[in-house]
Amino acid sequence: MFKRIGNVDIKLRHRASCHCGAVVLELELPQGVVDPRRCDCSLCRRKGAIVAGVPLSGLHVIAGEDDLRCYQFNTFTAKHYFCGHCGIYTHHQRRSNPEEYGYNVGCLEGVNPYDLGEVVVNDGVNHPDDRK
């Protein structure tokens, strides 16, 4: 599915998957990968993924919903999803904005996250919700 902007066709839907292919997502990204970033919280430091955001309505699990596992910690607001077979983190419902998913850019088909250049790191260690 494409959206025509001027003389350019923009791909609206992108596919993402875990390593073993059990979990497959479809993402609506009419602007492509926007605002990729890393986080330095205790979980994100360990998983090392580059993430970008999409509204909840813009991410669809099209295969492997039963294969997804959810991990929550600290305030139990964010929901981190990963494949129960290969362990790859695919996406999470954000703590900073529960109306948005963060998705693992490395899971997007045809995208190499190392081609993004320098990526901003968010201060997840000092999350504003922890100071309330």
Image: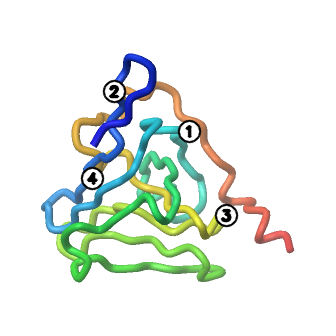
x and y, in percent, of residue 30 in the image: 43, 40
Residue at 65%, 48% (x, y): give it: 122
Depth order, front residue of 74/94 = 94
Depth order, front residue of 72/67 = 67
Q: Which quadrant of the figure contains the C terminus?
A: bottom right
Mark carried by residue 9: 2
Q: Secondary structure at mark 2?
A: strand
x and y, in percent, of residue 43 in the image: 51, 65
Which badge, 4 or 1, is on the more N-terminal residue?
A: 4
Q: Is residue 62 above or below residue 12?
A: below
Report which residue position mark 4 lands on: 16
Q: Secondary structure at mark 1?
A: loop
Report which residue position mark 3 lands on: 96
Report which residue position mark 1 lands on: 35
Q: CA distance from mark 2 to mark 1?
A: 21 Å
Which badge, 2 or 1, is on the more N-terminal residue?
A: 2
Q: CA distance from mark 2 to mark 3?
A: 32 Å
Q: Is residue 42 left or right of residue 10?
A: right
